[in-house]
Image: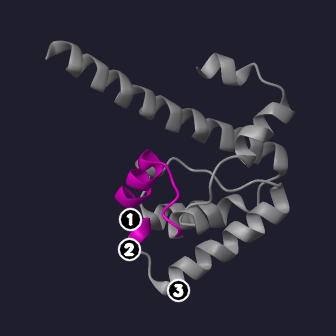
Amino acid sequence: MDSVIDSLSEAEKVNILEGHPDLAGRLADANLLTPESTREQKEAGLDLLTVEQRALLKSHNDEYRRKFGFTFIICARENKANAILAGLDNRLSNKRDVEIETGIEEVKKIARLRTVDILSKVTLKSKL
């Protein structure tokens, strides 16, 4: 999967990034995330953010989207809420090309972990 993503044009990579939901954003608030995204964000503790932390996350996410043209992406399964907030704050200072590459690397992590989950379920079912 990584090689397929790596072979995409920059515009195609940006399309992938543009289609990603905001962390703890409006889709999460409306309970419209995929079950996988909901579970991952919950395990990262994003459902436990204080009002102030949620406001900060939204503000920085909005700033990030204005600057780069797509949402901030980080593999929630490999981070907790405080690390996500710090990562967003730190990455706001990057240039767009760096964030395209960083965002794509995070998408690949998410895809890899989800693929392992799917294959584990298939393997478990075949053993039953």
The residue located at (48%, 62%) in the rendering is 83
- Residue 37 falls inside the magenta stretch: yes
Q: Amino acid at mark 1?
A: Gly
| Secondary structure category for the residue under label 1 | loop
* Highlighted range, magenta: 30-47
Percent of width and height locating residue 4: 67, 18
**Mark carried by residue 48:** 2
Q: Do labels 2 and 1 touch, CB within 8 Å?
A: yes
Indicate left or right for 110 with 68 as reference.
left
Indicate left or right for 56 with 109 as reference.
right
Percent of width and height locating residue 86: 56, 66
Percent of width and height locating residue 98: 77, 44
| Secondary structure category for the residue under label 3 | helix
Is 6 situated above or below 50? above
Is 103 situated above or below 8? below
Question: Label 3 neighbourhood size at 10 Å, few (<14), some (14-19), many (20+)?
Answer: few
How many numbered marks appear? 3
The residue located at (52%, 61%) in the rendering is 84
Q: Report the residue marked by disc 1.
A: 45
The residue located at (60%, 38%) in the rendering is 107
Separation of disc 2 and disc 3 at Cα?
11 Å
Percent of width and height locating residue 33: 51, 54
Quadrant placement of the N terminus: top right
**Quarter-wise, where is residue 49 in the image?**
bottom left
**Closer to us: 27 or 39:** 27
Separation of disc 2 and disc 1 at Cα?
5 Å
Q: Report the residue marked by disc 3.
A: 52
